[in-house]
Amino acid sequence: ETREALLAQRAETDAAHVEVARALSAAAAAQSQSQSQPQQQQQLPPRSPGESSHAAHAAARRVASAESEAQRLRGENGDLRAELDALDPAFFDEVMDMKRAYHEQTGVLEQYEGLLRRYAAQLGVPFTPAAALNHTS
């Protein structure tokens, strides 16, 4: 479960990095556009001074927001990595052993419940399996 959480966090961090790169690219394009505006005025219809300024500010806000989110995710990712590093491989092996033992015991329980159902039917007494008892609480 911890490993899946770390992998999900890693994917989220990677997505934030991509967003930062896109925002930086958009900001650079807006800045480049505003700097080269006199050359482009021959090819494009004239723009008001506020239009390119507004686009640059919007791009800068997206960059700042994406950088802030990326920084937050890097910190969270670091915390999760430290948590995961505290767990050694033997821990995960033990978890897998416990999972396997649980499934084996579930099979044994089902066999016993089958026998108890049969005996209860022969004796004419009611029998409620453990799984049914767990679902009613």
Image: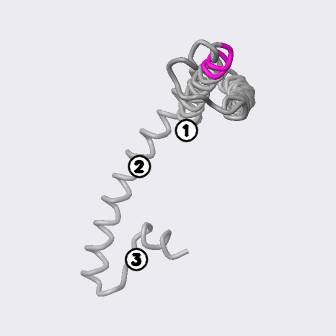
- Image-based side of 96 in relation to 124, left or right: right
Task: Tell me which segment is drawn in magenta.
Answer: 29-35
Specify whether 42 is left or right of 68: left
Q: Which of the labelled discs sits on residue 122, or is there none?
A: none
Q: Secondary structure at mark 3?
A: loop
Q: Position of residue 106 (x, y in %)?
A: 39, 53
At label 2, the amino acid type is Gln
Asked if the magenta segment contains residue 37, the reply would be no
Mark 1 is on which residue type? Glu
Residue at 37%, 78% in the rendered image: 127
Quarter placement of the C terminus? bottom right
Asked whether 6 or 95 is in front, the reply is 6
Q: Main secondary structure of the magenta part?
A: helix
Q: Nearer the viewer, residue 98 or 16?
A: 16
Residue holding disc 3:
128
Residue under label 1:
1
Q: Which element carries disc 2, helix, strand or loop?
A: helix
- Comes first in the chain, label 1 or label 3: 1
- Point out the frontmost of discs 1 and 3: 1
> Would you identify the image quadrant in which residue 114 lies?
bottom left
Indicate whether 102 appears above or below 31: below
Which residue is at a point 72% across and 28% down the rendered structure image? 60
Residue 15 percent across, percent down from the top left: 55, 29
Query: In the rendered image, which residue does mark 2 sit on?
Result: 105
